[in-house]
Amino acid sequence: MEQYEPDRLSPAQVAAMRRSLRNGRAAMTRRSLLRASTGGALAVGGLGTLSACGIPAAGKTEGGMSAEDHSAKEKEVSFSNWTEYMDVDDSGKHHPTLEQFTRRTGIKVKYTEDINDNNEFFGKIKPQLAAGQDTGRDIIVLTDWLAGRLIRLGWVQKLDASNLPHAFANLSQQFRDPDWDPGRAYSYPWQGISTVIAYNKKALDGVEVKTVSDLLDNPKLKGRVGFLTEMRDTIGMTLLDMGKDPAKFTDDDYDAAIARLQKAVDKKQIRRFTGNDYTSDLTSGDFAACLAWAGDVVQLKADSPDIDFLIPDSGYMTSSDNMLIPNKARHKTNAERLIDYYFEPKPAAELAAYINYVCPVDGVKEELAKIDEDAANNPLILPDKAMQAQSRAFRSLSSKEETAYEEKFAKLTGA
Amino acid sequence: MATLTEAPPPLTPTAPEKKPPRKRGRLVPYWLLLPGILWLLVFFALPMIYQASTSVQTGSLEEGYKVTWHFATYWDALSEYYPQFLRSVLYAGSATILCLILGYPLAYLIAFRAGRWKNLIMILVIAPFFTSFLIRTLAWKTILADGGPVVGALNTLHVLDVTSWLGMTSGDRVLATPLAVVCGLTYNFLPFMVLPLYTSLERIDGRLHEAAGDLYAKPITTFRKVTFPLSMPGVVSGTLLTFIPAAGDYVNADLLGSTDTRMVGNVIQTQFLRILDYPTAAALSFILMAAILVMVTVYIRRSGTEDLV
């Protein structure tokens, strides 16, 4: 998106305004003043700007990929992450793993939790990245599909493998070769996310739920079922339930999944589509069962004995949140060192023990067992072989497909 | 000189000499207006121009967007999303009427009957505003929870059967239905109704009521012929302050509603952030703005009041 340029427009508008202001007493009335200034602005700047402020092609960003790397001079790195996605000590003020990194390397980490939603964050960083400017961030954490889009647009930097020995050696097989970033040239996963079915035993009141079909069809659950606004998770789970593979489906399969969900919406089976706020619906019992992210469920389960999860026989969706270095980041090497640090088993285990998502690092089990035996044996955090075999990823979409699919999905959720 | 023979007008002795300072003084209001005008230009006029431009562009994220004067976007957006537009007007309108019904007696009470409790009640009206909009809306999820006391009571009294029949709720729940969204909107915008109402009611001279009584007007007649007409400015500005933001709101529909309660604000949000169809999002914003402008103009004309405070 083009930045607005005050210099180009203001003088003309100010001149128009002054002219109108000097025209005697008539200019004093509020109406004429408004008319004069907006009229002047529109006449002078308006039409010209109207056609001038197109949005430049995103992929053809001028200014290139990397900026000068200030890593050696400036011992710092700025890291933008999602909320509650980092270990915190009991006082709630310190992030032990990050502080350990600073102690060891001398690199200060500016840690900001300013990502709440992939779409919103994209809207936020897009103007700078499209204009080839520094976003002020050295590491950003984005979900697969958005990470893929940024790579496609050429807005992130290629990683230097020589700075990432641990990451290269310890990355779990499951996350090694996503189709949107073959061989992990641009990204490394922060955490994996499993989409499962969560339920509230009390609210279910004996109704048996085993599959996504139960959620969509069982009349006893009418109006007490939730699905996710994250298109890939909702559609992916539905496709799996229909016996299709979300890693390779066709347009027709997609439409069939939408139609299946639409039927459930029409008969008011689905109460609503939610983001992270399904957690409150589930604990209050307004949702008897819903699609949920496993990391949340581990947490909810610890707080409330009524909440539990299940994995349908048809399988479950896995995605990941990935660390990327945006174009023009000032501290690329420092950022790579930080990425690599989180692939050492010890910090990875400390992080996993705290945030309960799928740990993408191999060889963590012993370290994690030392901190939390239960977590080390929880397949939602360290998936075993059987669990991994059931995991499926959503295939990457071309931008055309993405628009078409998102549009259909938006219609399903009420536009 | 001839002028000396004439008697100088004693009442305006130095009028011509004061000219220069007065000239400077005449410019002062404009200088004082300048910050406001610049503010309007930078934060209103320019974004508007930018949005107007966006609405007639075509393209995609990869290829970039170019102004092609593609006005069809407006028609497409309107024909595709008119149900959400109508719904927005309906919900915002219902919330505004509810706000008026709830807010008028409250403002009347504060203005005329509250006595020493006046300030306390005012604080109670404004107090919820000290918490965030989101938190206030989320609180309604707890209040209206399926198993909660409110829904239980409504069920026992068979109120939900009636609202269900009217299509405002579905089954024995309130959350995720139109009723919940209208309740949320009403609650969130009530202070915007109460405050202007209070201001215009408070200004009414109490002696007018006495005079009406002296002329044998019953209390109801006094209200109809004296109080209400004098409070019209408050009614008009209150309804505007409630209706306009409510029509564009998307938080209530998002958190308290379901798929069949999405308002135009939700559509704009989805188009802009999720589908990345910036032209449609911009066109929808302009249509909403134009629709509100027309409705407000008609409304103000009809209400026949000049002042808005």
Image (spheres, rainbow, N blue to C red):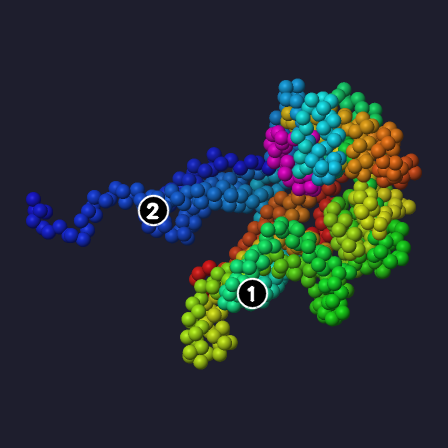
Number of on-image labels:
2
Residue at label 2?
A23
B177 in magenta: no
Residue at 88%, 57% in the rendered image: A207
Q: Name the one closer to the observer, A253 or B197.
A: B197
* Quarter holding residue A245: top right
Residue A140: quarter of image = top right
Residue drawn at x 53%, y 37% is: A4
Question: Do residues under tags 1 and 2 come within 8 Å of each other at their CB atoms?
Answer: no
Residue A132 on the magenta segment: yes
Q: Is residue B235 visible?
A: no
* Residue B168 visible, this orientation: yes
Q: Same chain for the residues at labels 1 and 2, yes or no?
A: no
Q: Amino acid at mark 1?
A: Leu
Q: Position of residue A163 (x, y in %)?
A: 75, 21
Quarter of image, res A122: top right
Q: Is residue B213 left or right of residue B58?
A: left
Which is more toward the observer, A361 or B79? A361
Residue depth check, mark 1 versus mark 2: number of the one nearer the observer: 1
What are the residue bounds of the magenta stretch?
Answer: A115-139
> Chain for mark 1?
B
Q: Residue at x 28, y 45 (%)?
A: B22
Q: How far is mark 1 from mark 2, CA to CA?
A: 47 Å
Q: Which residue is mark 1?
A: B106
* Spot occupied by residue A410 in the image (x, y as percentages of width and height): 71, 49
B280 to B113, vertically: above or below: above
Taking B2 as reference, is B294 left or right? right
Where disc 1 sits, the SS reads: helix
At a point 44% along the width and 61% down the height, the residue shown is B307
**Residue B29 at x, y = what percent?**
36, 46
